[in-house]
Image (cartoon, rainbow, N blue to C red):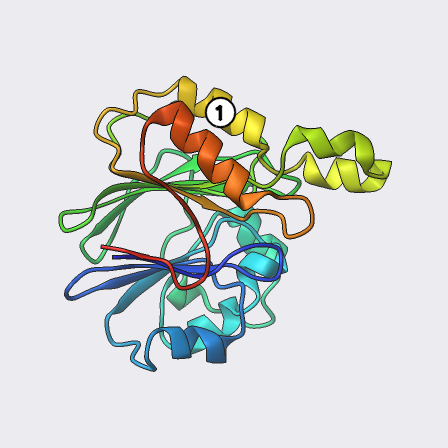
């Protein structure tokens, strides 16, 4: 299952769940809420992936580590989080672009994303029970082309229509995220054969139009598209 627990600038937390294992994506909400979302049972959690150091993605990294869960991130992200204690025994791999890591039954290949931080990553994740999942957020475009994936979790933060209506500082902030227009160009360049669904995540609360984004991406691709709202579960 793919579960959306929290998404957006107020905090991000997602999980990929099989019959025996759970892989956490991001830890940008309070640890109590993370535990609650997992029914207070962390025994199946095999690891946690962090895309970058912004608090809405990494807020509870230290607490996750204290729970005995290994956390995977780039070296740049680790430096950006600046932990006040040596958790090196719980950070077994500093992920690098195009490396391959086995995390329980999950195979993870990180790739570079484009954001206003040091060494952010997206992840291509495979599990025999779930297929191949693309996870990309907080990136204003993607250099890589991705083909033959089953599920796409991807940012669609705002539409470029709103840029001219915003103060310059706010427009600059938005431009570090993926717009609807860029997402359309991105998906058009991929072979989407076999994609079962597209989940739009990290939609801007103030400048996003979820219903419009969902409709336009589904019409463009012909693939069932979902708004990544908290509580969404895809089997």
**Residue 233: horizontal and vertical position, in percent?**
31, 58
Q: Quadrant of the N terminus?
A: bottom left
Q: Is residue 55 visible?
A: yes
Q: Is residue 93 above or below residue 126?
A: below
**Residue 2: horizontal and vertical position, in percent?**
30, 55
Q: Which residue is mark 1?
A: 184
Q: Is residue 142 visible?
A: no
List the single residue furthest toward the right: 167
Q: Nearer the viewer, residue 64 or 190?
A: 190
Q: Nearer the viewer, residue 211 or 52?
A: 211
- At a point 54% along the width and 74% down the height, the residue shown is 30
Q: Is residue 112 above or below residue 85?
A: above
- At a point 69% along the width and 39% down the height, the residue shown is 174
**Residue 17: horizontal and vertical position, in percent?**
25, 61
**Residue 161: horizontal and vertical position, in percent?**
70, 29
Quarter of the view holding residue 192: top left
Q: Crowding at label 1, few (<14), some or many (≥20) Cα neighbours within 10 Å?
A: some
Q: Nearer the viewer, residue 118 or 223?
A: 223
């Amino acid at each position: 299952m793919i579960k959306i627990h929290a998404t957006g600038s107020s905090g991000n937390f997602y999980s990929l769940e099989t019959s025996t294992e759970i892989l956490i994506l991001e830890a940008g909400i309070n640890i109590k809420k993370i535990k609650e979302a997992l029914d207070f049972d962390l025994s199946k959690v095999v690891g946690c992936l962090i895309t970058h150091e912004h608090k809405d993605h990494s807020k509870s990294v230290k607490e996750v580590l204290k729970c005995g869960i290994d956390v995977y991130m780039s070296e740049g992200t680790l430096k950006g989080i600046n932990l006040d204690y040596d958790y090196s025994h719980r950070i077994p791999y500093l992920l690098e672009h195009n490396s391959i890591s086995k995390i329980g039954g999950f195979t993870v290949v990180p790739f570079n994303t484009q954001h206003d931080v040091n060494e952010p990553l997206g992840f291509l994740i495979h599990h025999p029970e779930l297929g191949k999942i693309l996870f990309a957020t907080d990136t204003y475009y993607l250099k890589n082309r991705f083909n033959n994936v089953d599920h796409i979790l991807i940012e669609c933060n705002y539409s470029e229509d709103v840029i001219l209506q915003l103060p310059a500082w706010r427009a600059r902030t938005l431009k570090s995220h993926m717009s609807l227009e860029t997402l359309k160009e991105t998906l058009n360049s991929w072979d989407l054969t076999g994609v079962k669904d597209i989940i739009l995540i990290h939609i801007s609360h103030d400048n996003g139009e979820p219903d419009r984004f969902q409709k336009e991406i589904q019409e463009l691709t012909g693939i069932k598209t979902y708004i990544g709202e908290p509580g969404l579960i895809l089997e």
